[in-house]
Image: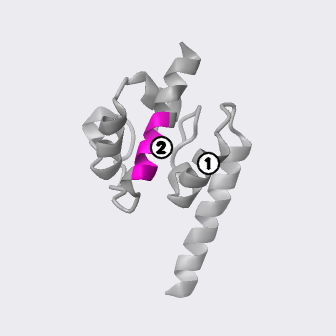
Amino acid sequence: MKIIISLILAYLSFMAMSARAQQQVKIPEDISKLLTQYACLACHKADAKVIGPAYVDVAKKKYTNAQIVALIYNPKPANWPGYPPMSPMKNVPEKDALKIAAWINSLAKKRS
């Protein structure tokens, strides 16, 4: 079991590094650490669709930070037709989820 978990973590880490290497949008170091820690980059990229929507596309939805946090904990697949459902990420502490949400929303300001 430990070997399987180690392999999964190694794969997610590799995917996160690959996603970061291809980013056009600069992710601040503190946010990058959070996105890596919680494996967000395995499914999301700042500026392109991977498995889930790009963070710039999430920013276009004009959710509040609190709404993004709520969606991290309780995703609504109906909000994103054409994407596979996201698993609830209840392991992300609220303070970290709020930092991630604020960064996502900052992308809308940079693109407008």
28 vs 62: above or below: below
Q: How is the image coloured?
A: one colour
**Residue at the (63%, 54%) spot, across then down:** 16
Residue of label 2: 99
Image location of residue 27, percent across then percent down: 64, 39
Quarter location, residue 7: bottom right
Magenta stretch in the rendered image = 95-102
Q: Secondary structure at mark 1?
A: helix
Distance Cα–Cα, label 1 vs label 2: 9 Å
Amino acid at dot 2: Lys
In the image as oriented, which residue stretches furthest toward the top?
112
Mark 2 residue element? helix
56 in relation to 70, above or below: above
Looking at the image, the residue that sits furthest to the front is 95
- Vertical placement of residue 52 versus 59, above or below: below
Residue position marked by numbered label 1 in the rendering: 30
Q: Is residue 54 in view?
A: no
Instruction: Residue 91: give its label.
Output: none
Indicate whether residue 96 is drawn in magenta: yes
Residue drawn at 65 percent across, 40 percent down: 28
Q: Is there a contact, CB below 8 Å, between mark 1 and mark 2? A: yes
Residue 72: % across, % down: 35, 48
* Mark nearer the N terminus (1 vs 2): 1
Alpha-carbon neighbours of circle 2 within 10 Å: few (<14), some, or many (≥20)?
Answer: some
Residue 10: x percent and y percent?
63, 69
Residue 42 visible from this viewpoint: yes
